[in-house]
Image (cartoon, rainbow, N blue to C red):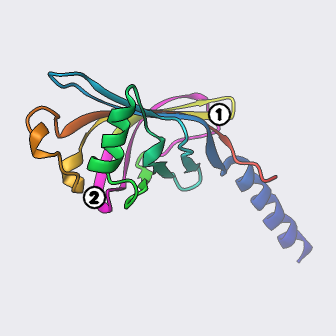
Amino acid sequence: MKKIALLLIAATLTANTYAQIFIAKTCEISFFSPTPIENITAINKTTKPMLNTATGDLQMKLGMTAFVFEKPLMQEHFNENYVESEKFPYAFFKGKINEKIDYTEDGKYKVTVTGKMTIHGVEKDKTVDGLLTVDMNKISISSTFQLDFTEYGVVIPALYTGVIPNVTEVKVNATLEPFKKN
């Protein structure tokens, strides 16, 4: 009985050494839309993605009002007229890394993440390509992908139809570290 208990404790300790929750120490999510009048760029630096290395689950919750624009009027229009951040304050992504990664080995891994993205209260299946880097117990993730806001019920006002594109380029760059309870 003692041997079984010791084996269970050893297995748990070994699993906890390699299977951890990682949370972003730094994260930058940006989007870019070129227009004939002026380019639209916004950056969100408050998001804290979480990764469970045992399961490959990746989750993000983005505060829509945390996107900072070059011009305050753009930020106001984005929040009031497009994403309606008072009504829909957050966007979410819950997905899973499709590839098997050995998080104990430093290296760069091309990955795809498949999951559910929710923006403006609309949930859609989404798969994105990315690069995951393991380096000395830190994990960096980066991805660039296209996002069509109209698929999520975001309406571009008639005045700007044909001027502001429906599709924007989104970039995600984050460095995650093991989560430590205080």
* Magenta portion: prevailing SS class: strand
Q: Amino acid at mark 1?
A: Lys
> Can residue 181 be seen here?
yes
**17 with respect to 141 (left or right):** right
Labels 1 and 2: the sequence-earlier one: 2
How far apart marks 1 and 2 lie (CA) works out to 30 Å
User: Percent position (x, y) of residue 127?
Assistant: 31, 47
- Residue drawn at (54%, 56%) of the image: 55
Tag 2 secondary structure: strand
Q: Are marks 1 and 2 in contact (CB under 8 Å)?
A: no
- Check residue 50 in the rendering and tell me which mark sits there, or answer none: none
Start and end of the magenta stretch? 100-127
- Residue drawn at (68%, 35%) of the image: 137
Q: 19 or 85, which is in the foreground?
A: 85
- Residue drawn at (17%, 34%) of the image: 164
Task: Read off the residue under disc 1.
Answer: 138
Task: Work out which quarter of the rendered image holds the N terminus and state it.
Answer: bottom right
**48 with respect to 75 (left or right):** right
User: Percent position (x, y) of residue 75?
Assistant: 37, 37
